[in-house]
Image (tube, rainbow, N blue to C red):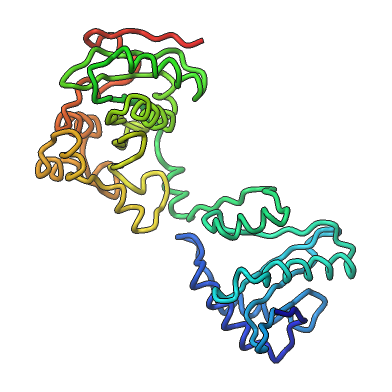
Amino acid sequence: MSIRDAKAQDRDRLHDLYREFVQEIPPPPGIPVDVEHELGELDEYLGDQNVALVAEDDAGQVVGFALAKIDHPGIGHLSDLYVVPEARRQGAARELIREAAIRLRDAEDAEVLTLGVQVTNGDARAAYERLGFQPESLRLFAPIEHLLERSERGPRGPSFGSVHVQTDDENAVEQAVRKYVPRFGRSAGSVVAAPRNGWTAVYDELCDREPGALRRLGSELSNATGAVAVTIGLEEGAVVRYNIFERGSVVDEYLSVPEYFKPLPPGDAIALGANPTVVARLTGADPHEFRRVARTAGTPEELGSPQELLEQIAGLMGLSGAGQGYEGAASEPGARGVAHR
C-alpha cells in the first residue's frame, strides 16, 4: 500500500469512489445530497493548494482517497476519507490521515486536524478515536417542514407513566425502587402499589417528568427481580408508549405515533408498532384484539383520545392503575410511599 498525490488522471476513479462512499454511508434521512455538486467540489481539490491524496494497492489500483484543507489559521480539516471495503484493515486510512496531517502541518502551519463523521458510523468513529480524535461539537439537523410543524404546536400536555412488574413480591420491587431511582436523578418520591392481577405497579415523580427515566427504571426492575416488566404511559399528552422488558432487555416497544418526536427511517418506524404475539406471550392479552387496538398513525388526532388508548392497551395487558402517574398514585390500593434522599 502506498500514498501519493492525486492527479488529474485520477478524476474518474475518484468520482467512482465517491459514489461508492455515498451508497455505503448515505446521509441521514431528511438531508439531501447533490452528488454532482459534491463531485464538482472534489475536482477543485485536484491541482490547487489543498491536499488531495490517493492510496494505491500493490497492483497500482487506487483503493482510497483523502481530501483536506486549511479551515482556519492553524486548523486543518479532513473533508473526505474513503477506502474500499476490500482494502480496509491494511492501514490505508491511517496512512492517508497521517500524510494529510503532515502536509497541512508543514505547508500551512496547521496545529490541529478536524473531521466530521456520522454518529451512526460506529466503526469509523472508533477508528478515529484510536488515532486520538476527540468529540468537539455535535451538529444537529432537522427537516425544515418538520421543524415548522413542531414549532407551531400548542403547549405540551402532561407526561406520566408507570412500571408494572409481573410479581406479587412487592417488597422486592420496593427494595429495587429504593436502589435504582436515586441513580437516575432527584425524585420527589415513588409509590409502590399492592399487587393486582399478578402485577405490582410503581409510580415515580422523576419518571413522570422524564419518560426516559421510566424506561430505565423498567429495565432495572425487570433485571433485579428476574420478572417481566412493562413501562406504559402518556407523553406530552399526545402519544402512548409502552416497553416490555424480559430480564432487563426490551422485547417489544410501541409508540402510537412513531414519528411524533422526529423523522425515522422506515424500518425504525415499523419497529415501533406493537408485536401482539410477544404481548400475548408475556401478558396474556388476546393477540387479535391487541392488534386491533394498538394501532399506529401519522398524527395523534388519527387515533382519537390518547388517554382512552392508554387505558385500552393497559386493560388488554391486565395492568391496573396505568391511567395515571405519580400524582394520583397514593390512592391506589395498598399504595406505599417511598422517599428518596
Residue 151 coordinates in the image, percent (x, y): 46, 43
Q: Which of 307 and 67 is in front in this view?
A: 67
Relative to 1, 220 lies left or right: left
Residue 47 coordinates in the image, percent (x, y): 78, 84
Q: Nearer the viewer, residue 14 or 56?
A: 56
Q: Give the answer, above or below, for where 305 lies relative to 299.
A: above
Q: Give the answer, above or below, for where 178 lies relative to 13.
A: above
Q: In which quarter of the image is residue 322?
A: top left
Quadrant in which the N terminus appears: bottom right
Q: Give the answer, above or below, for where 106 lies relative to 257.
A: below
Relative to 99, 287 lies left or right: left
Q: Which of 292 and 287 is in front in this view?
A: 287
Identify the residue shown where x is 41% and y is 24%.
207
Q: Quadrant of residue 288?
A: top left
Identify the residue shown where x is 77% and y is 81%.
5
Q: Give the answer, above or below, for where 198 lies relative to 142.
A: above
Residue 38 coordinates in the image, percent (x, y): 61, 75
Counting every numbered tag in the picture gives: 0
Q: Which of 258 and 64 is in front in this view?
A: 64
Relative to 210, 314 lies left or right: left
Identify the residue shown where x is 82% and y is 76%.
49
Residue projecting furthest to the bottom: 9
Q: In which quarter of the image is residue 329?
A: top left
Identify the residue shown where x is 24% and y is 30%.
307
Residue 209 coordinates in the image, percent (x, y): 43, 25
